[in-house]
Image (cartoon, helix red, strand yellow):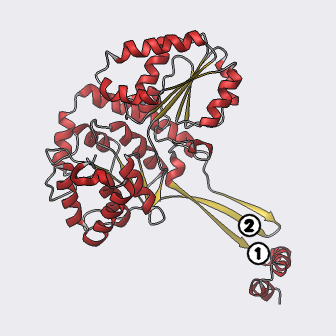
Amino acid sequence: MMDMTANNASQQSPEEVAKAVIESIKQRGDEALREFARKYDNADINDFLVSKEEIKRARESVPREIMEAMLAAKKNIEKFARRQMRQYEDFEIETMDGVFAGQRILPMERVGCYVPGGNYPLPSTVLMTVVPARVAGVNEIIVCSPPKDNNTINPVTIAAADICGVDKIYKIGGPAAIAAMALGTESVPKVDKIVGPGNAYVTAAKKLLYGIVGIDLLAGPTEILVIADGSADPILVAADLLSESEHDENTSCTLITDSASLAFNVKKEMERQLARLETREITSKALRNKRVFLVASMKEAIEKANEIAPEHVELQAKNASKLVPLLKNYGSLFIGKYTPSVLGDYCIGTNHVLPTGGSARFSSGLSVKDFINVRTYQYVRKDGYERIAGIAIKLAGVEKLDAHKKSAEARMK
């Protein structure tokens, strides 16, 4: 991922940086991409496309057990996506005698998946973005991910893309990658839609380019909210809160409980576990955002969670299944002590590209629906025309749209 703090970028807002990057790529294409690779990724790249030889080396370098884990996760994600796809189907109905309307489900032609690099590789994001697109029937899928100091992408990211059947992998990161996929360059094809998470600069680029290209959502920092009663295990609650907090120092970490003793024990347990984490430096910064709400009942806890509308919600309480119908606003819900959000991050089958910042009130996580278009059509037989045209003529008259009215009347003569 681009280090956007370099070269005084920190003095500019993400929107200002993204706007400048987009304009440069619009004007200079690959030349600008090479400049940004040197400036932000410390990479000297001539050919952005990952070669077959690079893919071969990457696959050979990834340990067998990691490859097997990725394949197992891919299988679950694919199975879930296929079941989702069943709800979208072609159909045709006769709305009136001689009047027919229908829909066709058509996959997008070309989609771009952005996979962050940053401090850690994120092969799980490859799986989460590419697999649903492939199940939806997208014709061409490309991946962009930032290069490292050795002028290539992390091998595990390349290997994940290859096992998912990605058509092309490009060594481009940050807002430059978003601009390249949205606008097209000499090397990078223009896509119909861009999906995948990223930092504030990536999100700013997606926002600025929306309309020129489709996007999935404008994701912010990771969020986790745990609803727990006195029966919950503080060790597990603490572990789960910490698990999402290590993503980013701006992560939102929230506990809602009706038990003061649980809240106290979770706090102590988080302190104990944090001291042992390899990622404690960034996790400890994220925990500055930690919030604890002590409520009078689980009903109040649910109401508070619906108000916050977070990305991940865990429900660790007695009779959790009875509480589930009351929860409405969340990116993804994890029910019971054996269902930590980490399973959703990697391998349970649901998607980890989820709405944040309260947007779960009106949007959903990534799924096959993000890669299809529902196209409607209609046709009318001569014997049905008089029935349907009469309605249109009357409504056009009410709206004073004379040409509309005359168009419908023309076929009545």
Are the residues flagged by discs 2 and 1 in contact, CB closer than 8 Å?
Answer: yes
Q: Residue furthest front?
A: 11
Residue 303 vs residue 394, the one in the foreground: 303
Which residue, given by chain and number where applicable, does mark 1 sit on? 381
User: In the figure, 143 relative to 228: above or below?
Assistant: below
Q: Secondary structure at mark 1?
A: loop
Q: Which residue is mark 2?
A: 100
- What residue do we see at 68% from left, 30% from top? 303
Neighbour class for label 1 at 10 Å: few (<14), some, many (≥20)? few
What amino acid is labelled 2 in the image? Phe
Q: Position of residue 212 (x, y in %)?
A: 44, 66
Q: Quadrant of the C terminus?
A: bottom right
Above or below: residue 317 compared with residue 196: above
64 horizontally vs 360: left or right: left
Residue 267 — which label?
A: none
Q: Is residue 317 above or below residue 380?
A: above
Q: Residues within 10 Å of mark 2 (few under 14, many from 20)?
A: some
C-alpha gap between disc 2 and disc 1:
8 Å
Quarter where residue 66 is shown: top left
Tell me the amino acid under the disc marked 1: Arg
Locate residue 140 relative to residue 320 in the image: left or right: left
Image coordinates for residue 123, horizontal then vertical, percent: 33, 38
Q: Earlier in the sequence, mark 2 or mark 1?
A: 2
Residue 21 picture location, percent across and down: 30, 62
